[in-house]
Image (cartoon, rainbow, N blue to C red):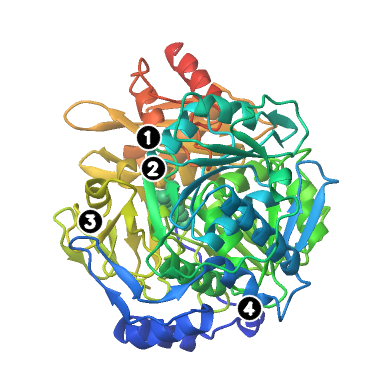
Amino acid sequence: MSAVKTYPVTEQQAENALLTRAQYLELYEQSLHDPETFWSTQAKALVDWFTPWDKLHSGDFATGDVKWFEGAKLNVSHNCLDRHLETIPDQAAIIWEGDEPDQTRIITYRELHEEVSRVANALKGLGVRRGNRVCIYLPMIPEAAIAMLACTRIGAVHSIVFAGFSADALRKRIVDFESSIVITADQCNRGGQPIRLKDIADEACQDLDVVRKMIVVKHTNADIQWIGTRDVWYHEMCKGVNPDCPPEEMDAEDPLFIIYTSGSLGTPKGAVHTTGGYLLWAALTHKYAFDHHEGDIIWCTANIGWITGHTYFLYGPLANGGTTLMYEGFPTYPNENRVWDIIDKHDVTTFYTAPTTLRSLLAYGDESIEAHHLSSLRLLGSVGEQINPDVWEWFYHVVGNDRCPIIDTWWQTGTGGIMICPLAGVTDLKPGSSALPLFGVEPALLDDDGQEMHGEGEGHLVIKRSWPGQVRAVFGDQKRFVDTYFSKFPGNYSTGDRARRDADGYYWVIGRQDDIIQRAGRKYTSSDIENTLLIHPQVAEAAVVGYPANCNEQHVYAFVTLMNESSPSDELRDVLIGLVASVEGRDCAPEQLQWARQLPKTRSGKILRSILQQIAANEVDNLGDISMLFDPRAVKDLVIHRLNQ
Ligand code: AMP
């Protein structure tokens, strides 16, 4: 690993921050050593409870059967809406920006409350009751947020399926989730391209008796097929419906939603999150990780189909009375200015995105950014994978103008919210590190035998104690739940990630356990080699995997995407291989380097290394179901090139 730079907290950042470093340390200590006081105080401050809890927490990781706030009653939509009506009824709750730049909608708390209540009553009218499951297959339009909140208002459990997933993927989820209601739209546009959602939903639901009603939002007015006995227009369903819908008093441990993990090409795994613990975790992590201040406008670019969209587009910001921006489209549509245009147009203060989006924007150069002032920005966030240090530097200097701290947040679907991240104005920043744990989070590194490592080191990242936002079950599959999270290192929540800890206690999450390359008796991480390749100014993206050589050894195979204006050449290939040899050592210089027009990514933007491993090993006959990829053509191109090598 190359030398680490540190960016100390600036005076200005410290002055603006919610907490001082001493307060963070004190609160963190309290969260571990006096959890009763810590969690009671936070829960009372951040969440409105109809009935307080009898027992704060019970259970452990031996069985994974944990509970928080037993006996308490609350409602999520009440917390996100009703309780703000007295103080900020006319503040924008959601700012919506459509696919085309002239489409904007602003929805205040008062309006959102009314619409959510109306839809909640309309759902009741269709027979939806507490505990029933509702599948939402909607694009990034306000009706998606409204439908989610309406479900929570009446105690129905929602499951969002990313709009654009194939009919097969949608069907698998509806079947697993046994959802009798599907909410979709006629069509949506992403990057100017229509996606015929209703057609896909029709195909998914063909001969599925479980689906009683399909509610359809008229979004683009596209022509669609209509099944009169099943289909209902959203706007007609709401017509004349009473907007007064008292929120259902839910138990803290009642399921709130089920979310299918991203990126899996096998049977989808539905992570179950519950009402009280999740809401508190969403509110607490949103408040502290994003240093939430009154008047902030957060733009979390994640789709609502992913947990990041649930927690930091919707539930966290609204629980804290913030304004959240929702964008329907694509970061570079109609051109590379779009992201910067949106930030300036709506005075976004908090921009939270993924390294994959940043790399795609960086590839266009700095000109379009320099044509924008971006002066409203106060904080930048990153999630989804390790942010490559050179991308971090660009984000900090060029986008944030050396002013905005970068909050690199490590977490996963099973954690419900952010677990490890620096805090604005509190934590010195190191590019590529998620820094320190949030309150109540006790991470540890274990060696291959499951022994805890202390001090500096690299190992399996686990979490030693329960926190309120943790996943409670895999829907309908207790064995899979225990196998996924609690079997590998008994007594711990297993993250499946490898991480390093440095002398300052900072965590550097380096990726999934499977991304380790064994070579010359040593373990190399893909991300180190990728980061080195990214140092070269002509490299836009890189993915590195191992492929089998002799005697349990692996060779290194690199896939490289070049900047828009660069072209591949043998000379450049030699330069890049030489660069890795000189920075990381000769042992991990790639044996093969293949040019890639694009890398295969999941819909949430994660590079799918398992497919790249198969391509590198030349095992391309059965690559599994690739329809879940963002663009399956990426794989086909790579296979053709591989076979022609
Ligand atoms: P998912 O459960 O699909 O949300 O994926 C979570 C996984 O993404 C984590 O287990 C990590 O492997 C990766 N990840 C998320 N955020 C970060 C981050 N800030 N740094 C490194 N890896 C990350």
Q: Amino acid at mark 4?
A: Gln
Q: Which mark is residue 526?
A: 2
**Number of the front mark, 3 or 2:** 3
Q: Where on the picture, by quarter, is residue 309?
A: bottom right
Point out the tag, 1 or 2, that comes first from the N-terminus. Answer: 2
Q: CA distance from mark 1 to mark 2?
A: 6 Å
Q: Mark 4 highlights which residue?
A: 13
Secondary structure of the residue carrying tag 3 is loop
The amino acid type found where label 3 is placed reads Phe
* Residue 116 or residue 229, whichever sits in front: 229
Q: Secondary structure at mark 1?
A: strand
What residue is disc 3 on?
486
Give the label, 1 or 3, closer to the camera: 3
In terms of depth relative to the viewer, which is nearer, 80 or 192? 80
Which element type, helix, strand or loop, lies under badge 2? helix
Location of mark 1 (residue): 545
How far is mark 1 from mark 3, CA to CA? 27 Å
Which of the two labelled residues, at mark 4 and mark 3, occupies the earlier sequence position?
A: 4
* Residue at the image point whose x is 63% and y is 52% from the top: 122
Q: CA distance from mark 3 to mark 2?
A: 26 Å
Q: Residue at x 19, y 53 (%)?
A: 487
